[in-house]
Image (cartoon, grey):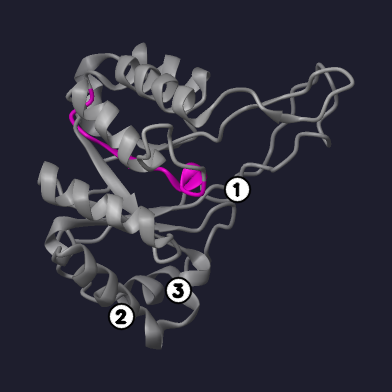
């Protein structure tokens, strides 16, 4: 397996600003990155003198996400789709799960999505990904969080068990190591990579992290300030 340091995998929250950026991206650049799309949560509404609750039904949310993603991703060669934030929502009125319904909506628009799975997903979610793997023949993406890496002794068995359940081999899987807001030490990252099971067999390997501050409260209004970004200038390429 080779490591392509020229290919970008942006993790996007499915917000309108990000979707607009995709819509306005020059098509010639689209082949240089694979968007990792997180399906957003159902937005909340805050009516006066009433209890805060969802602004719409899961049925309508699936329809809206399908339409907005179809518009923004119509020219993208492929993208990863993670339904982590809606996996625990109730079934739709027709009895289908939110993930199955979303996969079906995207199929009707012929969007080439690659379903994302993780070690922490519920059984129904895993079943939905398995169905998509069998139906669409695009494999899947395995997203590992930093806590997943803490038990290297068990990690291989956990991954092998999941892949066996999905009936996929490592060469059909894009492996994403997501450190979230934490940037791993440069000295530790090679050790972490080398400790991954089936290292030479994955279809692709991506390491993601971002040190962007969780709040901008420390920045004064109408001021321009420099913020240190730990991941900038963080070269790690290997073949």
Judging depth in this view, the residue of 25 and 162 nearest the camera is: 162
Instruction: Name which quarter of the figure residue 149 lies in.
Output: bottom left
Residue receiving disc 1: 211
Q: Which residue is mark 3?
A: 149
- Percent across and percent down for residue 178 are 45, 56
Give the image quarter of residue 117.
bottom left
Point out the tag, 2 or 1, that comes first from the N-terminus. 2
Of callouts 3 and 1, the N-terminal one: 3
Q: Quadrant of the N terminus?
A: bottom left
Up-down relation of residue 52 to residue 172 (above or below): above
Q: Residues within 10 Å of mark 2 (few under 14, many from 20)?
A: some
Is residue 86 found inside the magenta-colored segment of the image?
Answer: yes
Q: Residue 150 placed where, x, y %?
A: 50, 78
Residue at the image point whose x is 76% and y is 34% from the top: 216
SS state under label 3: helix
Question: Which quarter of the figure is the C terminus placed in?
Answer: bottom left
- Give SS at disc 2: helix
With respect to residue 88, does 161 lie above or below? below
Relative to 122, say whether 159 is above or below: below
Residue in the picture at 30% in, 80% down: 156
Q: Which residues are magenta?
A: 76-88
Q: Using the numbered discs, state the Cα–Cα distance from disc 3 to disc 1 in whole angstroms.
A: 19 Å
| Crowdedness near tag 1: few (<14), some (14–19) or many (≥20) residues, C-alpha within 10 Å | some
Which label is found at residue 156? 2
Q: Position of residue 127 (x, y in %)?
A: 29, 56
């Amino acid at each position: 397996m080779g490591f392509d340091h020229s290919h970008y995998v942006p993790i996007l929250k499915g917000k309108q600003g990000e979707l607009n950026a995709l819509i306005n991206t020059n098509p010639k650049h689209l082949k240089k990155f694979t968007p990792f799309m997180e399906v957003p949560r159902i937005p909340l509404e805050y009516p006066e003198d009433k209890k805060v609750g969802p602004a719409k039904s899961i049925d309508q949310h699936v329809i809206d996400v399908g339409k907005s993603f179809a518009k923004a991703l119509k020219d993208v060669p492929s993208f990863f789709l993670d339904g982590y934030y809606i996996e625990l929502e109730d079934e739709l009125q027709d009895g289908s799960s939110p993930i199955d319904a979303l996969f079906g909506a995207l199929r009707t628009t012929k969007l080439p999505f690659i379903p994302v799975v993780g070690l922490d997903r519920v059984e129904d979610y895993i079943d939905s990904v398995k169905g998509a793997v069998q139906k669409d023949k695009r494999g899947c993406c395995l997203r590992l969080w930093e806590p997943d890496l803490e038990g290297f002794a068990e990690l291989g068995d956990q991954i092998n068990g999941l892949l066996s359940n999905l009936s996929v081999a490592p060469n059909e899987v894009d492996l994403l190591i997501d450190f979230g807001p934490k940037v791993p030490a440069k000295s530790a990252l090679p050790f972490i990579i080398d400790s991954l099971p089936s290292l030479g067999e994955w279809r692709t390997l991506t390491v993601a992290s971002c040190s962007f501050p969780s709040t901008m409260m420390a920045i004064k209004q109408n001021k321009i300030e420099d913020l240190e970004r730990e991941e900038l200038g963080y070269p790690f390429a290997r073949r």
